[in-house]
Image: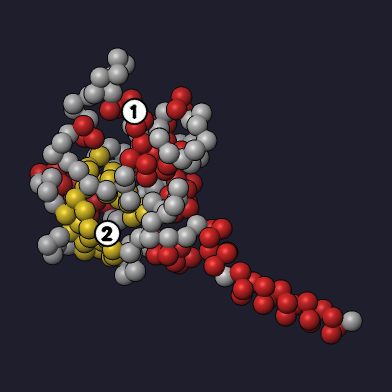
Amino acid sequence: MPKLKFDILESTCIPLPLENIDTDQIIPARFLSATSREGFGENLFRDWRYDTSGNKNDAFILNNQNYKGTVLVAGKNFGCGSSREHAVWALTDYGFRAVVSSFFADIFKNNSLNNGLLPVVVPEEFLNDLLEIIQREPETRIRIDLDKQLFSVLPPGESVEFEINPYKKKCLLKGLDDIDYLLSIREIIAGYEFRNKLKRCESK
């Protein structure tokens, strides 16, 4: 799946004010047999979106037509549990570009950054206020400026800065994964290897 460049994102949000959402709740283990990244979105939060008979659960937020957007705002400790990368695949395949929380499990956070999904860590008080605003006003829009590392509620509302690994930031801004990045600097790598080879020859 080609990765989209991430620069500035403006969107409405989908609120999920639950803490300790683990990867099995994001994508149940019974749906992990596929190896392609496509198609996981239809089973995102499967056991919450549907009942045991396969009927939609109207009480679950993804089935509420009042809430739309490419940003998921979740409670503290999102993505805990197993290390399955499929959880991120399900979120991106559904259409999410970013997830906002006050804390992410490290493995989930790294998997997200490796797959073009931006995990935005905000202070817990800010998160709680944001969830309250979105639930009260579903049309609320936010702006994520990755270059400035700034998350803002529009128009213009409160803003907070967020941290991100500089290397992963560069990859997201350019729409690159690790392999793409290495290929983009292959001439620099080749030059470095050539200079090292010359040094070894001269030292003999």
> In terms of image quadrants, where is residue 118?
bottom left
Q: Secondary structure at mark 1?
A: helix
Q: Secondary structure at mark 2?
A: strand
- What residue type is disc 1 on? Arg
Residue 9 image label? 2
Position of residue 90 relative to residue 170, above or below, is above
> In terms of image quadrants, where is residue 42?
top left
137 on left or right of 128: left
Q: Residue at x 28, y 23 (%)?
A: 50
Residue 46 image label? 1
Q: Position of residue 108 (x, y in %)?
A: 45, 45
Q: Quadrant of the C terminus?
A: bottom right
Give the mark nearest the N terminus, 2 or 1. Answer: 2
82 on left or right of 146: right
Farthest residue, direction top = 53
Q: Residue at x 58, y 64 (%)?
A: 182
Look at the image and tell me whether residue 18 can be seen: yes
Q: Residues within 10 Å of mark 1 (few under 14, many from 20)?
A: many
Q: Residues within 10 Å of mark 2 (few under 14, many from 20)?
A: some
